[in-house]
Amino acid sequence: MAKKQYSNHNMNSTHKKAAKIIGKVLLAIVGLALLAFSGLIVYFKWFYSSDDMDTKSYYVNSLPLSNDHFPEDFNEISSIVKDNYSLAEYKNLNLDSLCDSYAARINDISSPKEYGEMLEEFFASLKVGHSFIYLKHYTVGTFPTVIHDSIFINKPNYTMTRAGLRDKDRVIAVNGEPVIDWMNRNEKYVSASTPLSRRLFTAANIFKSLSDTIRNYTVCRGNDTIEVKLPLVTNDSIPSSVLAKTDSKVFNDSIGYLAINTMMDGVIESFVSDFEKVSNLPYLIIDVRNNEGGNSGNGRELCRYFIHKNQPHCIDHRDMLPVDNAYKGKIVLLTSPITRVRDNKSPNGCSAKRHRLSGDPVGLPDFLPSCLPPEDELPV
């Protein structure tokens, strides 16, 4: 009997020990799960939240920096560039030498305006359109038409027409300086990946300034030469673009047209609605000629509608999975000099192998049927 009681006591002790061990293991698992969950929250907060950085943009004349703080500020900027700019070798840049050459100029800078201009020039020297200094500008909110270095007013807004500018006016001088000379002098301040893109955005900067609130323009209208004084206003005074985030049309019952005009917030919902109208057609023209970019996460999501198998995104290399109703027909991608692409990828990272790229001016490929409307009927 004593042996039996001793045996039962032994078994109970063993069970208690086992229960304690199991309990500790379970607590450890729960703890690890909570730690992993907390890690995921932090990860998504810092890498995917649009509110992860408290940033503020300034006009150069309001920079909260005195002249003696310029060297320290630029040293911090150059350190960030050296640590994070991944295209230096591809662009044949020696970042140490580049940063040193600009740091040597700091002592000759005597005003925030000069410092802002130097920062614009520094970021432009990185030779990539996605790297630029986050400063506010005075502007009139327009993008001119550029034809062989001739600058034409394109659909002027109220501020411009009130000042006396008209559609298709040709700009020949800015503040009395011939427009070609002005562009040649200011091109070095423009961030761009290609010479063509740099030239185009330099032309746009005719109507944009870090510090000027008034600009004088000389324009040709027919046989007349006209002087116009144009006020440049704060960014906040310019209404947001009237372009819809996306737009769709159908030509001749077989060719879809889908414009994607931004990669900013709200584009996904707009895109899905328009995509459903053209997704079953055998041919699809995707127009990104007016798209200056935006959130790469939106680009990743859009790509899922045009791929047929998993493929890594070009920025974070995370796999993109095709949606169930991904487009299966032939695609024409219309681009322009303002469309910022990454190497041989289409905008925001889809593989370009299934796409026919068609630059500006539009040149449509032979595989589209002859029933396609003339190119001048495509939206511009």
Image (cartoon, grey):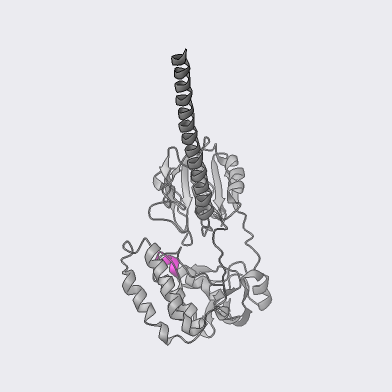
Q: Position of residue 101 (x, y in %)?
A: 35, 78
Magenta highlight range: 191-198
The image quadrant of residue 3 is: top left
- Asked if one can make out residue 328 in the rendered structure from this viewpoint, the answer is no
Q: Position of residue 307 (x, y in %)?
A: 45, 41
- Asked if one can make out residue 356 in the rendered structure from this viewpoint, the answer is yes
Front residue of 23 and 308:
23
Residue at point 48%, 36% (across, down): 24
Q: Is residue 341 above or below residue 249?
A: below
Q: Is residue 354 above or below residue 123?
A: above
Q: Position of residue 166 (x, y in %)?
A: 63, 73
Q: Residue furthest front?
A: 2
Front residue of 198 and 44:
44
Q: Is residue 239 above or below residue 223?
A: above
Question: Is residue 62 toward the left or the right of residue 193 in the image?
Answer: right
The stretch drawn in magenta includes residue 186: no
Residue at point 37%, 60% (across, down): 86
Front residue of 30 and 265:
30
Residue at point 50%, 33% (across, down): 23
Question: Is residue 226 toward the left or the right of residue 125 in the image?
Answer: right
Query: From the image, which quarter does the C terminus lie in?
Result: bottom right
